[in-house]
Image (tube, helix red, strand yellow):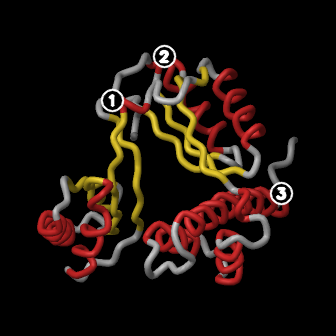
Amino acid sequence: MGRGPTVEGRKNAEDAKRAKVFTKLIREITVATRAGVADPAVNARLRAAVDKALAANMTRETIDRAIKRGSGADGGADMQELRYEGYGPAGVALIIDCVTDNPLRTVADVRHALTRHGGNLGTSGSVAYQFQRRGEVGIVTDGDPGREEQVLEAALEAGAEDVVNADGESCVVCGADDLESVQAGLVAAGLTLDRTQVVMHPANRVEIPAEAQDTLLELIDALEALDDVHEIYHNAVLPNA
């Protein structure tokens, strides 16, 4: 009879997964620092990256080293933000945001993943027009109707466009340029913010054939497995999406 995974094997797999998450978080902290200033108190993007890293149990020492790199030390200036656009199976539009110190490696890896799953890399602007930049603020509500109502009232007062409740979280949506003011309004209302980010929302989502859904999910998994890939956006309607 075959033996299942050992405790050591499971631990090694978890350690590898944790290391990959940390790699992505460190790169985001580095780039966020370089794009603004090295103080999370006045750099909203850096503050969000640091909060995400702390939530993932990254140590302060590791975070401080990433900020130091982003300020110009230890090669942090070599990190670049790159955006790739392309198509997945059934013509699904994809935006793939990356943080890398080696663009040649990154584009090769992204192209390979797309090609293997029935997609292709497009030119700059080929799909971006199908998306809109939006700010998002996530607040844990645990599905409590009273809490969700509190978030809704505070969000509308702060100038948000919408609030979407799902999976125990209220997601406050606003214009990308309004994110700072909406965030400040929510904090002023006494709410604890769990995540803050600028994302690309599809202007319209499209239905794709059922047989293409698994391939698309496999493509997304393959892209997320790449160390350089930071965020992936698509316009497909998927189960539980």
Rendered residue at 30%/57% (across/down): 177
Rendered residue at 60%/66% (across/down): 34
Instruction: Looking at the picture, tell me which residue is in the foreground, 150 or 137.
Output: 137
Taking 219 as reference, is 51 above or below it?
below
- Report the amino acid beneath label 3: Gly
**Label 1 residue SS:** loop
- Quarter placement of the N terminus: top right
- Quarter placement of the C terminus: top left
Q: Foreground mark, 2 or 3?
A: 2
Q: Is residue 150 left or right of residue 67?
A: left
- Of the numbered discs 3 and 1, the one sitting upstream in the chain is 3
Q: Position of residue 143 (x, y in %)?
A: 27, 63
The number of numbered badges drawn on the structure is 3
Q: Which residue is mark 1?
A: 205
Q: Position of residue 121 (x, y in %)?
A: 60, 24
Instruction: Looking at the picture, tell me which residue is in the foreground, 4 or 235.
Output: 235
**Label 3 residue SS:** helix
- Report the amino acid beneath label 1: Arg
Label number found at residue 90? 2
Rendered residue at 53%/19% (across/down): 89
Q: Which residue is mark 3?
A: 9
Rendering quarter of residue 132: top left
Instruction: Looking at the picture, tell me which residue is in the foreground, 103 or 222.
Output: 103
Asked whether disc 2 touches disc 1, contact meaning CB atoms under 8 Å apart, the reply is: no
